[in-house]
Image (cartoon, coloured by chain):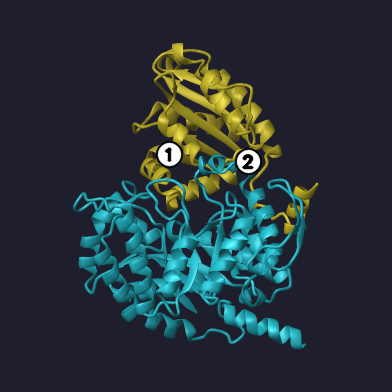
Chain colours: A yellow, B cyan
Amino acid sequence: MKLVVVSAGLSVPSSTRLLADRLAAAVDRHTPVDVQVIELRELAVEIAHTFTNGFAGKALAAAQDAVAGADGLIVVTPVFSASYSGLFKSFFDVLDKDALAGKPVLIAATGGTARHSLVLEHALRPLFAYLRAVVVPTGVYAASEDWGAEGLPARIERATGELAALMPLAVRAGEPDVVPFAEQLAALQR
Amino acid sequence: MQFGIFTVGDVTPDPTTGRTPTERERIKAMVAIAQKAEEVGLDVFATGEHHNPPFVPSSPTTMLGYIAARTERLILSTSTTLITTNDPVKIAEDFAMLQHLADGRVDLMMGRGNTGPVYPWFGQDIRQGINLAVENYALLHRLWREDVVDWEGKFRSPLQGFTSTPRPLDDVPPFVWHGSIRSPEIAEQAAYYGDGFFHNNIFWPADHTKRMVELYRNRYAHYGHGTPEQAIVGLGGQVFMRKNSQDAVREFRPYFDNAPVYGHGPSLEDFTEQTPLTVGSPQQVIEKTLGFREYAGDYQRQLFLMDHAGLPLKTVLEQLDLLGEEVVPVLREEFAKGRPANVPDAPTHQSLLTATRKEAVA
């Protein structure tokens, strides 16, 4: 199965990517997966251009195809101004509106303090619910202090177990079906 | 194969001088551009239709009727006619009238329009865009083919015993293209009727255009109008030329960088690599345009966007000289090479009339 990891960390190395990698490795322990990591930092300019010219550049288009073809997603953002980062949101803004429908998604975030941990429930979960993704019940938030405390590995374990269990049920995007014209016309005459 | 130009009709400041043409100047410039298109040997002039600033062409048949009186050969068309927010009855009347005045030198391209507020301004709802296109065109199609129409639908008041006048010239309705960039439903609609399909690919990468055109071609064959290769395809293009390609890039860059739609976005270099835009010598334009055939197949109509983003009229007319003298003659010759004999030309009034008469005899 194919697992796509979307990381919106900006620094190199970043704690966002660190969390993303630990989550991906944990999924692989539950069920073997091919992992592809999408670093949004590398796509930042193409994402901005997509807003101005209406189509995705080559690297962004490849990332969008990867998302559409994934059996599951891990999405990780740093907390900026009490929410996901603008870059993180922008990537999902330029994604096809049906790309995540029926797809299992594990939401995760990093921040400087544990005070922001509900960003998962107040910002990320509604976004992915809107996109009709199947968001796993456990989200993973890692504050700086969590990297030296107990609890994070257990949350990673639980969340990734949930994701691994849902991935075989994922809906993958295919070519859109054409509705025969006569049916389209008939639907209007009903 | 037909070659021509299509205009959006934008009133945009010239970024090199800061001067904005008046609406009158822009409208007159569009007419001058159309006349020039005929003078340099192009086949088609198409105008957009818009109902919001900074665009002037809200009344295409008025403009095309005026151009018809000042030209002899040029085919007058649209890019596009809003099948969603116009009353299909008025489209039927306006274009039949234009057909008579222009002695049949008329076709038109259906489009939905993507400016949200225009829909409510005309009493419609953008969320019904596809359905409006489907139902309104179904009515338009009948109004041009049946002398007396009884009709009832979702979006317009019913018609009982209605005759759209004038009847189409020689009882031959204008040929219709359907323009769409990303909606498979419209490719399907064009295929169903055996109409033309125009992909305005100027902002889109080749692989996307290829998918849409292939869909249309396959469905055209599915509906029994011919083989996929015989479907009627049109494409957009966008060029700026000077003899010396560096001069073209230098002169066009400020217009590109400040253009509505894609200005302040990607670099000119990235955009020319990813889309049909060509900025360079006539030879480069020829090479790029010939490449369209590789992903769209042998096609029937190539329209170029030449007059947007604030380019002054004088420059546009120079561009048309280059297009007519150095580019299109070579394209005609090269596109004809290796073109299968059973691939038809774009229908014209004359060819449709001949076909109707043959059918009547048979």
Q: Chain of mark 2?
A: A
**Residue at the extreme top:** A115
User: Residue at left 66%, top 60%?
Assistant: B140
Q: Is A20 placed above or below A32 here?
A: above
Do we see residue B138 in this rendering? yes
Label 2: element kind: loop
The span from disc 1 to disc 2 (Cα, nearest Å) is 18 Å
**Residue named by callout 2:** A71
Q: Residue at x 38, y 69 (%)?
A: B34
Chain ID of residue with mark 1:
A
**B354 to the left or right of A143:** right
Instruction: Pick whichever of labels 1 and 2 is earlier in the sequence.
Output: 1
Structural crowding at the residue carrying mark 2, measured as other residues with C-alpha within 10 Å and reported as few (<14), some (14–19) or many (≥20)? many
Residue A100 lies, with reference to residue B91, above or below; the image says above
Q: Residues within 10 Å of mark 1 (few under 14, many from 20)?
A: some
Closer-to-camera residue (B155/A1): B155
Q: Is residue B211 visible?
A: no
> Which residue carries the number 1 mark?
A39
Residue A113 placed where, x, y %? 41, 13
